[in-house]
Image (cartoon, grey):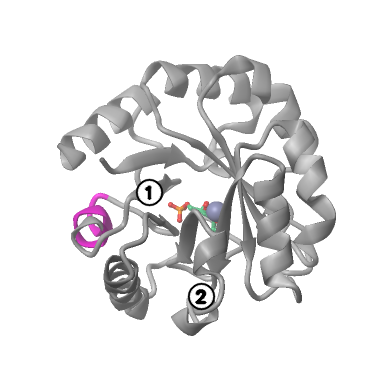
């Protein structure tokens, strides 16, 4: 079953509570929180306080995508804010295995996020410490970017590696996940779709209409 996760940074910030409640009623599978520090990526977005204030509104899992330097220093903060799963960038932490293990030690799912240019070989020695791999299909930092073509091949290659090792690790994709790219990423084995401005938060559709269209595409 392919999962849909709204990208909260793409929601209407003035109507965040309303957006969460409406998406909760549409049975989304997870909420994706983009956390940026202005260093690892050239932008600032959501922080733990926002996550904490939204936590009582829904039982749907909260997925924190940490696009920050030294994410190991913020695992506790996001755990306390209500995250159920956290992904850290391989490029942003020196002791990757330790960071991933510390996420699991706190009872959360551990994800490793890879920039488009980062090779899959970085996964070689951490297969047993990850629950999901977040493949960035744009360079992280901003909504509304173009899909990077070679990232499509990477999804298929990762899928083959996971199957070959008989592991149950999910592939999450993030960046320009649109009506056009969804069938292609699904075909290559993506199971968690981060849905932002390209598919869910659209000017010409209500959230309900966009969710209905997405579900139709997935059925
Ligand atoms: C990119 C973010 C994504 C982005 C996805 O850095 O991690 O979550 O908001 O949304 P669109 O569909 O605008 O690419
Ligand atoms: Zn993200």
Any part of residue 67 in sight: no
Does the magenta segment cover residue 64?
A: no
| Between marks 1 and 2 in the image, the one whose residue lies nearer the viewer | 2
Locate residue 162: give its quadrant: bottom left
Report the span colored magenta.
179-185
Which mark is on residue 193?
1
Distance from Cα at disc 1 to Cα at disc 2: 21 Å
| Image position of 206 (left or right of 122) | left
Number of marks drawn? 2
Query: Residue 76, can we see it?
Result: yes
Above/below status of 171 relative to 90: above
Q: Is residue 119 left or right of residue 150?
A: right
Q: Residue at x 45, y 65 (%)?
A: 135
- Image x and y of residue 195, in percent: 41, 45
Can you identify the residue that label 2 sits on? 123
Viewer-side residue, 107 vs 9:
107
Say which residue appears at 66% left-offset and 23% top-offset.
55
Mark 1 surroundings within 10 Å by alpha-carbon count, few (fewer than 14), some (14 through 19), many (20 or more): many
| Majority SS type along the magenta span | helix
Question: Could you say whether the residue bearing mark 1 is in a helix, strand or loop?
Answer: strand
Residue for point 47% across, 68% down = 138
Q: Secondary structure at mark 2?
A: helix
Query: What quarter of the picture does the N terminus occupy?
Result: top left
- Return the x and y of residue 179 as percentages of the image width and height: 24, 49
Residue 135, compared with residue 19, is above or below; it is: below
Instruction: Using a 10 Å C-alpha cutoff, classify the residue at mark 2 as few (fewer than 14 neighbours), some (14 to 19) or many (20 or more).
Output: some
Quadrant of the rendered structure where residue 126 is?
A: bottom right
Q: Which mark is residue 69?
A: none
Residue at screen point 18% across, 60% down = 187
Task: Give how far across and how far down residue 119 sits, in percent.
Answer: 48, 83
């Amino acid at each position: 079953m392919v999962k849909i996760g709204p990208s909260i940074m793409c929601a209407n910030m003035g109507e965040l509570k309303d957006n969460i409640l409406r998406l909760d009623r549409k049975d989304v599978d997870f909420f994706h929180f983009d956390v940026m520090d202005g260093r690892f990526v050239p932008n600032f977005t959501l922080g733990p306080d926002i996550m904490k204030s939204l936590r009582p509104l829904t039982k749907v899992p909260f997925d924190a995508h940490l696009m920050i330097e030294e994410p190991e220093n913020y695992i506790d903060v996001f755990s306390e804010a209500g995250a159920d799963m956290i992904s850290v960038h391989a490029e942003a932490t020196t002791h990757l295995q330790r960071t991933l293990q510390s996420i699991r030690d706190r009872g959360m799912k551990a994800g490793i996020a890879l920039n488009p240019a980062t090779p899959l070989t970085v996964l070689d020695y951490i297969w047993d410490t990850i629950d999901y791999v977040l493949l960035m299909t744009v360079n992280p930092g901003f909504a509304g970017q173009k899909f990077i073509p070679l990232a499509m091949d990477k999804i298929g290659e990762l899928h083959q590696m996971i199957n070959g090792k008989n592991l149950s690790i999910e592939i999450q994709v993030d960046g320009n996940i649109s009506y056009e790219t969804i069938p292609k990423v699904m075909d290559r084995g993506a199971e968690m779709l981060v849905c932002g401005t390209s598919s869910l938060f659209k000017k010409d559709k209500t959230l309900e209409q966009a969710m209905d269209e997405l579900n139709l595409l997935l059925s």
